[in-house]
Amino acid sequence: MQTETALKALVKEKYGEIADQSRTQNAASCCGAGGCSTEVYNIMADDYSRLEGYNPDADLGLGCGLPTEFAKIKKGDTVIDLGSGAGNDCFIARALTGENGKVIGIDFTERMVEKARTNAEKLGFNNVEFRFGDIEQMPVSANVADVVVSNCVLNLVPNKFTVLQEVFRVLKPGGHFSISDIVLEGELPAKLKEAAEMYAGCVSGAIQKNVYLELIEATGFKNITVQKEKSILLPDDILTHYFSQEEIQSFRNSEAGIYSITVYAEKPLIEEAPCCAPGCCN
């Protein structure tokens, strides 16, 4: 098992490479981390092209949902996007929050931040800002955001509880988040977890769905709702690199599943003392 530092270094290196790939290249891969499928189709991401504010230069096909569509963003809101990549969700959010709002994207991959800033400059947006930083220690003051969004990023972070605590900190009282992420139901084969690490943690960093929701509750969030859920099917041409046909069939017949979920939750207007960790509150 790799250390948190090693896993974060792996993600940073891989997503630095992804920043220079096209959406077509990323769409043929698992979370965009290399050409692992012989069929060109998007394994996890949803189609953004119909949404206002969509910019193809910012769409690297790395997401697993449409959190901005469900985020209830209003005109004038301040929105923070965790793991903002080339800026796709930020530009969608900007279309919703308008010229009087503010959008802050945070990413810890320098090449992604550079690409996002270039895209923002091309679009002439002066209220969309991209900051280099770790979402476990966000370069943002407390109580500044009306909405936090994120798309297929927490599964890449070893310490998800720390990130959720940071989300709670930066949200204004009464603010909320909408986050799309990968979760599991049932135990995946060890070989699959090891293979997923080679694709920058698309699956290996995911945790059980019930544990994911418990972490959100333990942080102090209220009104937790799963806004959308879809099953993720890994194609055979990926699995055959790591499994025999018998093992693939056994996996297909098992109860283990990989899912994309979009989760909504609110920070209470009056803060309560959060739990120290999941399971400590009675």
Image (tube, rainbow, N blue to C red):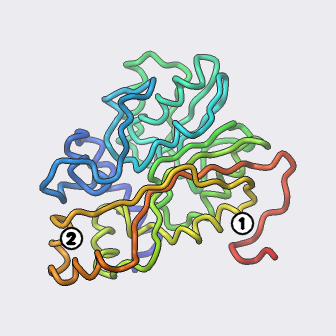
Q: Residue furthest left?
A: 38
Q: Is residue 254 left or right of residue 279?
A: left
Query: Residue 151 location in percent, x, y?
Result: 47, 47
Residue mark closest to the camera, 2 vs 1: 2
Q: Nearer the viewer, residue 125 or 64?
A: 64
Query: Residue 47 location in percent, x, y?
Result: 35, 38
Q: What residue appears at the point 71 percent right and 37 percent down from the top-left corner? A: 144
Q: Nearer the viewer, residue 96 or 156?
A: 96
Dot 2 amino acid type: Leu
The residue labelled by disc 2 is 239
The residue labelled by disc 1 is 218
The answer to whether marks 2 and 1 mark residues whose Cβ atoms lie closer than 8 Å is no
Query: Residue 112 location in percent, x, y?
Result: 38, 41
Q: Compared with residue 199, is residue 55 higher up or lower down, i.e. above or below?
A: above
Q: Quadrant of the C terminus?
A: bottom right
N-terminal of the pair, mark 2 or mark 1, is: 1
Query: Residue 145 location in percent, x, y?
Result: 68, 38
